[in-house]
Image (cartoon, helix red, strand yellow):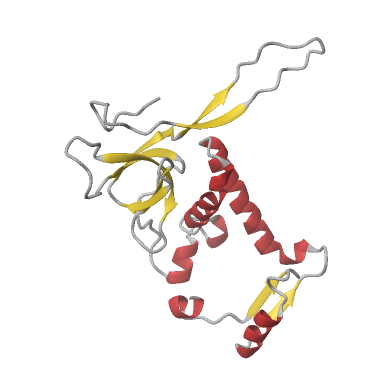
Amino acid sequence: MISTQFGVNIKVLRSDNGREFVNSSLSTYLAENGIIHQTSCVDTPQQNGVAERKNRHLLETARSMLYTMHMPKSFWGHAVLTAAYLSNRLPTQVLNKRTPNDVLSGNPPSFNIPPKVFGCTCFVRDHAPSRGKLDPRALKCVFVGYSSTQKGYRCYHPPSRKLFVSMDVTFFESQPYFQSSVTPLQGENENNDMEDVSLTFTPVPTVGVQNSDPWEIQN
């Protein structure tokens, strides 16, 4: 992809000593393509500082998005992909306020589609042929990112466990799909230690036929 999309060749690959990098298959491929493979010393991750810092940046961004919108940890993969998507399209001081995509491709920095708040409630237009005249016209979903192969938003419908890619989406960015249930503090015990706070994740019920307005948010 680097050679085809950006017209450059990879000359050096630096990694740690993990088996996913140090093995006969990859070594043969690198040798056939004239790529030098450098590895860091054992227990010396600072020798591969660029990759380590980027990994930390993606993890911190993903954790922040999950925590802010009360998303279950099972969505961590979508969060990391979204963090990488946004990171490649946001200006950075390291590149003199240019975006990574702009530097690589030479095109002006821009989003292919307007960014939205990860984990918010969204309604995806239901184009199912089996939909009746009195059925809801949209499905209540959670926004989980952007497609890499289509110009559309990735929206997940928990009740049916289906993932939709669509541009026909209405977003409620201030409304998380998952609501946090926090037990109020009951006071302090004899040792003046606060009671534990339990945090659970409960999905908001989907919109049903009984609602007069299928776009109404159910709290």
Count the marks. 0
Question: Horizontal and vertical percent for residue 113?
Answer: 35, 54
Question: In percent of the image, x 72 and y 75: which residue is there?
Answer: 22
Q: Is residue 58 above or below residue 39?
A: above
Q: Which image quadrant: the C terminus? A: top left
Question: In percent of the image, x 72 and y 66: which residue is there?
Answer: 48
Judged left or right of residue 210, residue 118 is right
Work out whether residue 46 or residue 142 is closer to the camera in this orientation and state it: 142
Question: Horizontal and vertical percent for residue 132?
Answer: 19, 41
Question: Horizontal and vertical percent for residue 82?
Answer: 49, 52
Judged left or right of residue 45, residue 2 is left
Work out whether residue 8 or residue 58 is closer to the camera in this orientation and state it: 58
Q: Is residue 75 above or below residue 48?
A: above
Q: In which quarter of the image is residue 95?
A: bottom right
Question: Horizontal and vertical percent for residue 173?
Answer: 39, 37
Question: In percent of the image, x 73 and y 17: which residue is there?
Answer: 194
Work out whether residue 206 or residue 31 is closer to the camera in this orientation and state it: 206
Q: Is residue 8 above or below residue 149?
A: below
Question: In percent of the image, x 27 and y 26: which residue is there?
Answer: 211
